[in-house]
Amino acid sequence: MRLYEDLRPVRTRLAVVQVVVAGLVALLLLQFWNLQVLRARHFQDLAENNRSRVVTIAAPRGALLDRQGQLLVGNRPSFNVVLTPEHAEDLDRVVTRVARTLGTGEAAIRERLARRRVPYEPVVVRSDADIAEVAALEARRLELPEVSIQVVPLRFYPLATAAAHALGRVGEISERQLDSPAFEGLEAGALVGQAGVEAQYNRALMGRDGYRRVIVNSRGLEVTEAQRQPPEDGPAFTLSLDTSLQMATERAFAGRAGSAVVLDPWTGEILAMTSTPAYDPNEFATGIDPTLWTSLANDPETPLMNRVIQGQYAPGSTFKIVMATAALEEGVITPETTFFCPGHLRVYGKVRHCSVPGGHGVVDVRRALAMSCNVFFYHVGMALEIERIAAWAKRMGLGEPTGVDLPHELGGLIPNPEWKLRTQKTAWYPGETVSVAIGQGQVTATPLQMARVAAIIANGGWLVRPHLVHSAGGGGLDFEPPRPIGISEETLAVVKEGMKAVVAGGTGWRARLRHTVVAGKTGTAQVVSREALERSPDDPSIQPHGWFVAFAPADEPRVALAVLVEHGGSSGVAAAVARSILARYFSEERRPAAPPPTAEAVD
């Protein structure tokens, strides 16, 4: 009995040892399960990446061509310096040596490394490296096996600033874009469309990247290629732009700020589009310098803004096209209706002035358009009232985006009593209607919208959807077809006669061509009150904007256009710009055979 009592502590110790051994065996089995099953893929990737690397072969973005097949945007070969951190034994040392070789700061390289989201993904630490930089790195391949050179296609814009806002630009994908469903599957460092056609059709233009799987030795140097998947190039896009007309449009502005757009009035195809001042999209292709970006973003002249679709201006007297159409269609006037213009009109207790202090005398709607008589349209505005004015303006495409195939288009504003009550909590006053009647007050429009208004009169009352892309990859794209908006032939004929008279001897005489009849309408949009302008008549920043919208030939239209010259002082400057554009399109001599303006022919 005493013997068994002496063995009891031994049995207890043995039981403890057994439990400990069993626990250790269980832990070993769990770790074995973890390593061999749960983390098998991870260690397989580690082993695979020790002996092989996947090198992305970037797909060239699709080229952009003009309507004659001339290259607008293409690609050129460039060198990217890439670094794979997992292949570096001492990453800090590698970053320091690469920065020293490239002559750049370490912080920029470390920032790019920190943005990477996928392990073993090579990181581009220098885009578009020059030959000297490539040679310096190649000479140090044994010292820096973690670094390699990739030959990639780089976006190239041969027109530089010309058509920059229409064509757009590419740039490195942002953090916000990486989290957006529209950019799903893309990684940090990818170049994507950031503006214009490049952004609107980004996915289609990108194509599909390929890859090379290469076998490397213990020093990370390539031994052989194990697998290759070739890239799929993005399809070429044919745009409706005409390069020669585009360049003529750029030259016509001669350093002025503003915008112009030329349309096919029957299809809505955009033949030329310029917004000045502009930027050079080539500067964005490899990642823009932060100092230059800050300069562009803070420039008071807003070179990054596409004025054609984002500039919202008072349309001035170009809005009288809408007023004349609405008044004739609503029956508040007839083609024979006349009003007497003494140069001013007292409306609701306030004296309103005409464009000519001495007045235009007796005018009908044709002459009112030709001479841009404010008094005539004051009467028309009071007869129509704001509800019918707003309804017809919206019917003619104002107050909402046109649907052009470009991102970030704005819609302008067509005010009405409901809008004012909702936004300003006050009622609409009849005096405001008088201002709207001559395109002032709260009404605003973009140049593209006003070009479409001109196209409506040109094509017989059809509202077109403007667009830039004609075909992609050889196949046409479907756009919303033109739709009739219900304007009678009689009204269209009267308005067209008035617009022909504008150029023949009215306010738009500077747009006259020798052999082509042009129909147009001038407009002057005030940016400050008349009193403020009279106090500082020489201040260029408060000069009115100059408008001119037109179509030609007047009886068989082939083009419609709108020109807006910021702070041009009068519509005459815009009409002269338009003439240069039209002269190029119709291949006429540049100097017009036009008389000097009469006292009446000002706007």
Image (spheres, grey):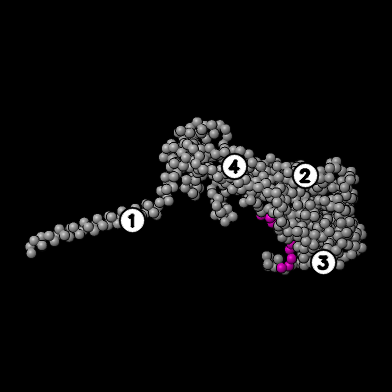
Quickly name the residue at label 4: 286
Q: Secondary structure at mark 2?
A: helix
Q: Left or right of 362: which side holds 42? A: left
268 vs 327, nearest the viewer: 268
532 vs 147, nearest the viewer: 147
Q: Left or right of 478: which side holds 104? A: left
* Mark sitting earlier along the chain (3/4): 4
Quickly name the residue at label 2: 245
Q: Is residue 413 magenta?
A: yes
Extreme residue in the left direction: 2
> Principal SS element in the magenta part?
loop
Q: Residue at x 66, y 54 (%)?
A: 408
At label 4, counting other C-alpha atoms closer than 10 Å, the crowd grade (few under 14, some 14-19, many 20 or more) is some
Observer-side mark, 3 or 1, equals 1
Tell me the tag on residue 30: 1
Quadrant of the frame with the N terminus? bottom left
Q: Which residues are magenta?
A: 408-418
Callout 3–callout 4 Cβ contact below 8 Å = no
For the question of whether residue 442 can be seen, the reply is no
At label 2, counting other C-alpha atoms closer than 10 Å, the crowd grade (few under 14, some 14-19, many 20 or more) is many
Quickly name the residue at label 3: 384
| Picture layout, residue 503 above or below residue 392 | above
